[in-house]
Image (spheres, coloured by chain):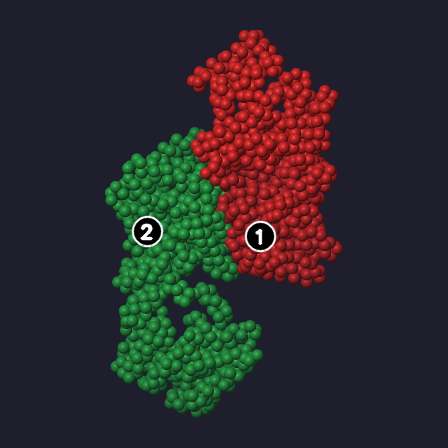
Chain colours: A red, B green
Amino acid sequence: MSTAKYVYLFNEGRADMKNLLGGKGANLAEMTNIGLPVPPGFIITTEACIDFYSAGQQFPKGMEEQTLEKVKLLEEETGKKFGDAEKPLLVSVRSGAVISMPGMMDTVLNLGLNDNTVEGLAASTGNRRFAYDCYRRFLQMFGDVVLGIDHIKFESVLEDQKYAKGVEFDNQLTAEDWQQVIEEYKKIIKKETGEPFPQDPMEQLFKSIYAVFNSWNTDRAIVYRKVHKIPDDLGTAVNVVSMVFGNMGDDSGTGVAFTRNPSTGENAIYGEYLTNAQGEDVVAGIRTPQPIAQLEQEMPDVYRQFTETCTLLEKRYRNMQDIEFTIERGKLWILQTRNGKRTAQSAIKIAVNMVEEGLISKEEAVTRVEPEQLDHLLHRRIDPKAQLEVLAKGLPASPGAASGVVVFDADKAEKMSQEGKKVMLVRMETTPDDIHGIVAAEGILTSRGGMTSHAAVVARGMGKPCVCGCDALKINYTAKQLSVGDRVIKEGERIAIDGSTGHLILGEVPMIDPELSGEFIKLLRWADEIRDLGVRTNADTPEDAAKAREFGAEGIGLTRTEHMFMAQDRLPIVQKMILTTTLEERQEALNELLPMQQEDFYGILKAMQGLPVCIRLLDPPLHEFLPNVEELALEINKMELTGADAGEIKDKEALLRQVRSLTEFNPMLGHRGCRLGITYPEIYAMQARAIFQASAQLVKEGCDIIPEVEIPLVMEANELKFLKELVTKIAEEVQEETGVQFDYTVGTMIELPRAALLADEIAEDAEFFSFGTNDLTQTTLGFSRDDAEGKFMHHYLDRKIMKENPFVVLDRKGVGKLMKMATEQGRKVKPDLLVGICGEHGGEPSSVEFCHIIGLNYVSCSPYRVPIARLAAAQAAVNNKEQSK
Amino acid sequence: MSTAKYVYLFNEGRADMKNLLGGKGANLAEMTNIGLPVPPGFIITTEACIDFYSAGQQFPKGMEEQTLEKVKLLEEETGKKFGDAEKPLLVSVRSGAVISMPGMMDTVLNLGLNDNTVEGLAASTGNRRFAYDCYRRFLQMFGDVVLGIDHIKFESVLEDQKYAKGVEFDNQLTAEDWQQVIEEYKKIIKKETGEPFPQDPMEQLFKSIYAVFNSWNTDRAIVYRKVHKIPDDLGTAVNVVSMVFGNMGDDSGTGVAFTRNPSTGENAIYGEYLTNAQGEDVVAGIRTPQPIAQLEQEMPDVYRQFTETCTLLEKRYRNMQDIEFTIERGKLWILQTRNGKRTAQSAIKIAVNMVEEGLISKEEAVTRVEPEQLDHLLHRRIDPKAQLEVLAKGLPASPGAASGVVVFDADKAEKMSQEGKKVMLVRMETTPDDIHGIVAAEGILTSRGGMTSHAAVVARGMGKPCVCGCDALKINYTAKQLSVGDRVIKEGERIAIDGSTGHLILGEVPMIDPELSGEFIKLLRWADEIRDLGVRTNADTPEDAAKAREFGAEGIGLTRTEHMFMAQDRLPIVQKMILTTTLEERQEALNELLPMQQEDFYGILKAMQGLPVCIRLLDPPLHEFLPNVEELALEINKMELTGADAGEIKDKEALLRQVRSLTEFNPMLGHRGCRLGITYPEIYAMQARAIFQASAQLVKEGCDIIPEVEIPLVMEANELKFLKELVTKIAEEVQEETGVQFDYTVGTMIELPRAALLADEIAEDAEFFSFGTNDLTQTTLGFSRDDAEGKFMHHYLDRKIMKENPFVVLDRKGVGKLMKMATEQGRKVKPDLLVGICGEHGGEPSSVEFCHIIGLNYVSCSPYRVPIARLAAAQAAVNNKEQSK
């Protein structure tokens, strides 16, 4: 077996060899090949790193020999030599991962210096102080990074020296001072490692390479990768580059620049530089860097060369670049280029402008903006310039910022809001009983519950800021106050939350309203041209529907009728309906609800005229509309002990018995969804009647409406058949009673594994399918969202048992497999079956992509995620077209 | 289009034309063709009935003409004529369904009688009284069955006549008396229908056929079919048979006989007859019938002819026959034959004897016994001769009978049982906290909960009688009494339950112990030779294991370690383990549990030596081991209101907070199964250690043991990988510590849809799969067993939305599809993967058959169902071999 090629000269690589050479290395190679002034160097591949680990942290066979060869070539090219007292070759050794992990891994600069070569450097630069400063920096860096000696030890020597010399800053020390420091450093190294500092540059080099390889698996690197979802098995490359110096006088300098403005997107070079300085000096902040434009005055030729380089690199990479450069005695060196990070606003502007400049296609433009970034632009946010007093941090459950006075219960929140006050609803957790309070509040803050707790889900649906699971918060309902540590906040005091960061902030906070720029709108239009998937919204009110329509929704994929049941004026009627034992009394209550539901549907269908509106019949278990068992039991107990009226106690006990009889062990798997329609057909009949009476009314008024009646939680074709007959009968009755004809369809949610498995049978009676992936995920994985996120999801993610929270990112392997089967089987029976998704995944880019791949007709998401879904759908179309080429 | 052949003469049919001719008709045809003396007749087909319904309850085209033809042939063959005053043809018209529905459908006898022909009958029989009795019976039957007149109206005429004549019994009335009755009957018919009684025999015939067709869809017939799971679309045939009379003198008679004893299986004709009588007289009970043996004395020729007929029919049908016969003036007529119903004991003996007689094969023998029937033989039962005071009826949740004194709580049950008292545990419902009480009790009675409630499942597992959901029962824990209506029973009073019928019985009751006959054992051995499926048992104790082994279990398919955690002496340690927040304290509690668990496993492995024992690591959510939230809250409330010690209240509140934090919204989908092993690896480590230390000990003692370690609730290969590593590490540690080598395997439950969908990945790390079909059914259908059975399952069965309760009979279409996929995918990766089932379906015959079809290695069920599973597995092998031929 021949050994692998482990070491590449820059001119042997290319930009597309990123996996082998790392991001930085591939770009250095690319720049070298297009003739840009890159200091000569070579790259040790990621493969070497991977083989290093599989060999038990040993250099793989052949790597050392190859490195020696390349060092020789480097010496020839630079005319310098490792260890040469006159023209010493100095190099930097840096990690270069495939996916950038800024600040995470180790770097050694000025490698090659020793007691001999430092003098060579002093002579060639004519600056002893500089040379010895370099040397002591190298010793310090090498000691810390390569030899693992605590950097405090070096720093205290430095502090002692400054103290002894009576100076404040490093740059006040002389060459001789540094020489003394260097002697101390060498002693530290000897003492800590038992070996003297290695004078041999080759030994320095291999030790450094070893250290860089090792830095791939430091704790902080592992944590970083976990946070940023970078695989652990990529390995890092090592870049060995000959040093250039920006501190060789006023014709030298160093800087960083973006080819366009990373915060606004403006097409002008943006950056800063320092003359007579090294990169570190910029970071140290001792001198203030100058804006890059200044360079035009100081070194016009260099500046011209630099701007040409920017243009060249943008053309080459077809993207905005983030460039590091050094000027050594009037000569420009490019040390690094990479795609520049940018704000959402900048990303959009750059993408749109580059299309207009003919640099990229529309298809590329839509892939240039992270859909999740848009979220930020669609909500009010805290002025980034504001000074904030952040009290605590919870989960960023629903984006946007809000402020208001603290209120602890929903009724009061509603009352105060009606009085014109802006309120912040603060609860341990919310339940459906709190809906009116959530509606009334500016934002919601809870101390318990995860990203998919009730508060989070409802708030996201309403586009209302929410911070959840803020466990530093102690809430005392009785005392009407919350506390964080010693800090107590009483009801009525003002707080703010930032639902994008999870921050809880004290007092009033300045806000910025969202702006939808012309470029934003243009980009989304292009996305619409490109995507195959339709984008609908989940909306329960005419207001939500109108908002979503503004954001480009092409219909409603889910209207939850139960939210309408929760309204304060309806709940008593709903409870009456549930608690009665006779059909007559239930019918009476339903008759009261009918005109209200009809009005609801009238409003939504009207707001969406011309577009389809999918209305789900009642879904949640009935006891969700009833008082809590434990609270009732406590109340009765109290009544008994305080000698309340026996009749009243009896009534309460009867109520408790009824509520208890409706309580379920596992409500998620209980008496809900179409099971309610089968046991109480009169409830679904009322809802169907409300939909159709509203439809008839609108048709009469000349509106074009497209109602879709959706049966939830089907697991068996007979359920759908039974309920479809019921709905059809009501439709015919209403058409006869009103004399108005209207179109409608009847279909079903696919949200249980059995429904997916039997999709062919179910498709016989369904005109559409809509995947309810929240429930489908829960049942396929046997994983309760509410329970898992609080109790064990983090273990699963920490231990990498799962890569993603399946309630956030659709589980393609399990849930996705069922979705694919169901879609295929359904379409086998009905080739034009309309298939969509309405779970929360409908607004998450990776999940949207999967829906594109399996050929769904549309995704549906909350109004504020509609633009995100539009963009994600376009990206899915582009990325998967490329793949299939 | 030519019309169908709707009418068959007996000699045109065959036994295998049952679907077309109905059971009775096909057998009459068969007997006619083999030369037995069957009265001539014809059959109108089930197809005619089906077409009758599809034509909107109209005779199908051609049926009437064909009937007229056959009547003519019948007249020719009998030498009698419809309506002939001298030799009138009289016929019976009876329904004849494909699957017998005894007593459900209508019959008209003596059809053809009218004012004219009655005189002919009188002349030919020489018995006017008899002729007029026949006529009035016909009028009454025709009026009731065909014309739909309430039979009370006829009966009151009869009662008036008897009163007027001063007699007590019908047979004391004279011909003239009957003539008067007949005139009154005709008046009733005229008055009720507006038409006179039809004198024309053809009109009588077609009206009767119409009535029989209609009787297919009476309410009672529909209910019967639902109860007995007979399809609604089979239709009934109609048998028109010329009448023969057993009441024409002492050389006439009528009787019913079985070719073998239907209750013991003894090979001797068993039955009874009456001379000079009609079938009705036997039923009326006015005269006592004589045993069939008596016939040998009275009519030796007839008796010999009858015994020959019995032999002939048994040979023909290769089964025990139930035969109706009539002797008319010394001539034997066979009116019906069918496979005789029999007790389990008889079925077994007959099947075994018939094999020994060379009549049937062993394969046929094993299909001749309903597996469910065996249940009866395996449990103590109430002496069928006993006089019982049945107080109420609940669900027959776990078979067998038991009696004991009423006790309302588990602790007391345990205490009294230790004092040697036989107790009956009576609870509204049971929870895992009651386990020790269930263990101590003779039987369990609950007022709430279905066939799969906690009490039912646990009791069946222990083979302990249980009656559940007895809702007539009012239980008052405070007063320590139960009541049914006005009847009050106090703690300490004696009751009995019959878990096979659901009866609650007052007082002491005589019992019969189960007997396993030699034939039973022989039949099961044949079953063992025939079946492909292995049969294991679910057992949690050495006693259960030993019992199951006696019943033929070939290993343990499921040992639930949590039941061991519930023991009274361990629960406090378990609770300590759960409630601690530090790993150290948890480890301490686990260290206490370790020797106890080791002892458990030692006992079970030893009881099962030589056979595999599959041990499932901890599965239920931890809060199942903790006190109930609502009860705790009430207790605290009471303490507060009564001014208890503040410190004690604080402690209780802390406990409540902890318990609450462990409480889940949907525990079935929550923090349980291997999720516990992942968040608390130390718990699984302790259990693995206990298993392996027990294994090492047994190997040292020379026992051959085969432990299988099972990881529950896996949904992702990484879970299994992580926990398998843990288990393997512990095994290696124990082997090193003890110096003993032992074999073991590690595998997983497949009980979540995702596990089934990803079975190929999971099989990589699994040495076996075991389907947990209880959980798999719950998640695939999104159907909580506990909630569904109480709240809406009956609607689903009533409305035929589902044909079977999927928790009783495996849902082949949904759950079964997943099982098939998982088995195939798993074996694709590991061709010799061991695959079994351990849900309750493992002991249900149809589910066992499905397991055979998809090629599982074994089923596992509770000890008392092991013989049932052995037989069902053999039947599956036989039935599916035949199908594939």
Residue A103, above or below A871: above
Callout 2 crowding tier (Cα within 10 Å): few <14, some 14–19, many ≥20: many
Camera-side mark, 1 or 2: 2
- Identify which amino acid the numbered label 1 is placed on: Met
Taking depth in this image into account, of B754 and B823 the one nearest to the observer is B823
Residue A321: image location, x then y, percent: 66, 32
Residue B138 visible to an observer of this rendering = no
Taking depth in this image into account, of A551 and B167 the one nearest to the observer is A551
- How many discs appear? 2
Callout 1: residue from which chain? A
Secondary structure at badge 2 equals loop
Residue at position x 61%, y 42% in the image: A845
Residue ranking furthest to the left: B701
Secondary structure at badge 1 equals strand
Pointer 1 residue: A749
Residue A504, above or below B560: above
Residue A177, above or below B154: above
Residue B171: image location, x then y, percent: 37, 81
Residue A371: image location, x then y, percent: 63, 40
Examine the image and state in which quarter residue B530 appears: bottom left
Pointer 2 residue: B555
Residue at position x 58%, y 47% in the image: A850
- Identify which amino acid the numbered label 2 is placed on: Gly
